[in-house]
Amino acid sequence: MNSFYRDTWAEIDLDAIYHNVSQLRNFLPNETRILAVVKANAYGHGDAQVAKTALEAGASYLAVAFLDEALALRKKGITAPILVLGASRPNDVHLAAKHQITLTVFQPEWVEQAANLYKGTERVRFHLKMDTGMGRLGVKEEAETKRVIELIDRHPYFSLEGVYTHFATADEINTDYFSFQYHRFLQMLEWLPYKPSLIHCGNSATALRFPNKVFNMVRFGISMYGLSPSPDIKPYLPYEIKEAFSLHSRLVHVKKLKPGEKVSYGATYTAETEQWIGTVPIGYADGWLRKLQNFHVLVNGKKAPIVGRICMDQFMVRLPEPMPIGTKVTLIGRQGDEYISVDDVAQYLDTISYEVLCTISYRVPRIFFRNKSIMEVRNVVLNGNDYV
Ligand SMILES: Cc1ncc(COP(=O)(O)O)c(CNc2conc2O)c1O
């Protein structure tokens, strides 16, 4: 088990991941498959570890953003089907074939180029992306849709396994645009000369709010990590989900400031009274962003304000009382009766939980807990990303 040499770490509760996926498994009809979205290092939680846990809990498909992420999972021994949700290059189709990775298609020209370039005899699976109103990727017209399918079917080793769309507003209270996209999807599905085996449209919000509108597979992301797709729909979630991510550090320096003394770059903070200041070894290069100045962390179960500018690798807090070096600091998570959620950090930053999670950088080692005990430590700084 490799270690780390700065007292800052993230804790990933894989039991929470297992709980969230198995709850969805019980919530959905038995025939509806669960695809676990593990792109962006599983939203910062650890791609292979989350993938394995989600598969144990009932997921049967995985999804990533681009081909490199899929190849990385294969290198780490993941053999389950993987869908690349984003664009890929026609000349990389041989890699998808070799590693049994499913690609998203949405341009006739792409399929034509891939068919001309691919000389292998291994099967390549595709999911056709339909743009029903997300305005990002996908076919929009009947002619291009039929052309893509015709070109796939014409190739001896290409096969259309799935068709899908993505909703722009499934996490909003108002469902007008959601309904517009859903009905557009129904219309566009009528263009297909046949129904592929997998039809999917639902992200977490759709799966949890409209389980009867997901066809036969859901793409489960944010709520697998225990977070509501948005604060607005949190009261309407059908069952309890558990946050899997927490972030911790330890005080490395404690000092008493006299009135008038300053803290950090720009000397923007001035002690008005005699007070105790602690230094915490995590900064914006770890994804703990400068805009979090004046937010708070937890020390000895109490809130401690972040004072002065956040530095690249450290920040300072005003302590409620003198504390020893090594005192645990919780930036996201629980101490006693106090809790700082990913959503609290997102709200303070005027962003969303997804971005907070994905921003905690590779510099922060991840400690993985399963059955409430440490199963591994992943330190990318020291061991690179190939560490399994
Ligand atoms: C195509 C697609 N399907 C499913 C999901 C999972 O959604 P969920 O995490 O809400 O369950 C995403 C998330 N994609 C993004 C989430 O934030 N920005 C994105 O591009 C996605 O892009």
Image (cartoon, grey):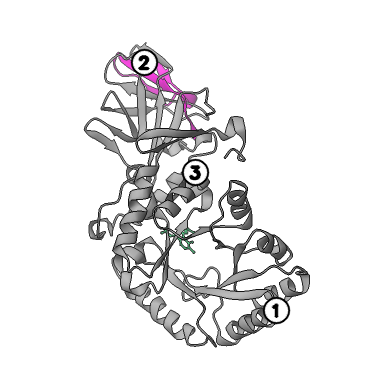
Q: Is residue 221 magenta?
A: no
User: Which residues make up the magenta segment?
Assistant: 261-284
- Quickly name the residue at label 2: 260
Q: Marks 3 and 2, Cα distance to the nearest angstrom?
A: 44 Å
> Residue 215, position in %: x, y?
40, 74
> Residue 318, position in %: x, y?
33, 22
Find residue 209 and report its image quarter: bottom left
Q: Out of 192 and 267, give the one closest to the viewer.
A: 192
Identified by mark 3, the residue type is Gly
Q: Earlier in the sequence, mark 2 or mark 1?
A: 1
Find residue 193 and report its image quarter: bottom right
Residue pictured at 53% horizontal, 85% vertical: 194
- As drawn, the label of residue 46 is 3
Provide the secondary structure element on which disc 3 rests: loop
Q: Is residue 167 visible?
A: no
**Above or below, 346 relative to 325:** below
Q: Earlier in the sequence, mark 3 or mark 2?
A: 3
Identified by mark 2, the residue type is Gly
Please give left or right for residue 310 compared with residue 146 in the image. left
Camera-nearest label, 3 or 2 = 3
Please give left or right for residue 320 compared with residue 48 in the image. left
Q: Marks 3 and 1, Cα distance to the nearest angstrom?
A: 37 Å
Provide the secondary structure element on which disc 2 rests: loop
- As drawn, the label of residue 273 is none
Camera-nearest label, 3 or 1 = 1
- Quickly name the residue at label 1: 155
Q: Is residue 280 magenta?
A: yes
Q: How many C-alpha atoms fall within 10 Å of the one at disc 3: few (<14), some, or many (≥20)? A: many
Residue pictured at 44% horizontal, 79% vertical: 185
> Residue 289, position in %: x, y?
46, 38
Identified by mark 1, the residue type is His
